[in-house]
Image (cartoon, helix red, strand yellow):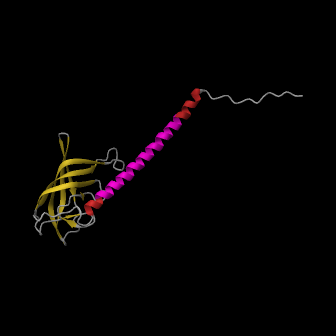
């Protein structure tokens, strides 16, 4: 009869050896959660931009006429090329939808300019434009001006928006699409 030693189990790693592995797992969990959060923010942002674009550029929805606007008064061109008067919502930067007017109430619309009060939606690009959500500034003033002649009539070519953060006033000047010059 031969005696054999019982099988030995490998010794458990010391607690200090487990710490680096635990840290790696924690970093992976945080990275997965961050990626999921970023994906959710991007999807929500895309949905919001789609809604803003649709409300500012689809048909006559969002555009009204008080009857006070002369038939020959300049229009503003939406991102889809429609000419509208007094739109309540208007995307200003058609290429990236990083700025828009929402809930706009127009006080004047004549041959030289249009004036109103709006909620200004703008991407402040902090920390970068891709991951920054739009910020909304209520009570901003908007002026559309510099009408230009196009084959389809006069179109405003510039928007000037003034909004406030605390006591500081900020001014944004955005060139508008006009649908071509005459």
The range drawn in magenta is 23-52
Quarter-of-image position of residue 6: top right
Q: Please determine whether, in this image, residue 45 is positioned above or below residue 155.
A: above
**Residue 51, placed above or below residue 167:** below
The furthest residue to the bottom: 151
Q: Is residue 100 magenta?
A: no
Say which of 87 and 164 sits in front.
87
The residue shown at (35%, 55%) is 47
Residue 46 shown in magenta: yes
Q: Quadrant of residue 5?
A: top right
- Between 17 and 6, which is closer to the camera in this rendering? 6
For residue 181, side relative to residue 125 (left or right): left
Number of numbered discs present? Answer: 0
What residue is at 59 percent from the left and 29 percent from the top? 17
Residue 132: percent from left, percent from top: 33, 47
Q: Quadrant of the N terminus?
A: top right
Rendering coords of residue 50 (x, y %): 33, 58
In x, y percent, where is residue 118?
A: 19, 52
Left or right: 140, with 34 as reference point: left
């Amino acid at each position: 009869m031969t005696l054999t030693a019982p099988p030995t189990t490998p010794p458990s790693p010391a607690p200090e050896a487990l710490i680096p592995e635990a840290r790696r797992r924690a970093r992976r969990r945080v990275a997965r959660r961050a990626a999921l959060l970023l994906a959710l923010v991007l999807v929500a942002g895309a949905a919001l931009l789609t809604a803003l674009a649709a409300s500012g550029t689809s048909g006559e929805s969002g555009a009204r006429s008080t009857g006070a606007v002369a038939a020959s008064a300049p229009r503003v061109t939406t991102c889809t090329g429609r000419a509208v008067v007094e739109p309540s919502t208007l995307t200003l930067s058609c290429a990236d939808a990083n700025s828009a007017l929402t809930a706009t109430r127009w006080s004047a619309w004549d041959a030289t300019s249009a004036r109103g009060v709006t909620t200004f939606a703008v991407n402040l690009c902090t920390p970068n434009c891709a991951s920054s959500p739009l910020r909304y500034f209520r009570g901003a003033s908007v002026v559309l001006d510099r009408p230009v002649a196009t084959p389809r009539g006069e179109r405003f070519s510039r928007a000037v928006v003034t909004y406030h953060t605390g006591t500081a006033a900020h001014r944004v000047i955005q060139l508008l699409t006009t649908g071509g010059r005459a």
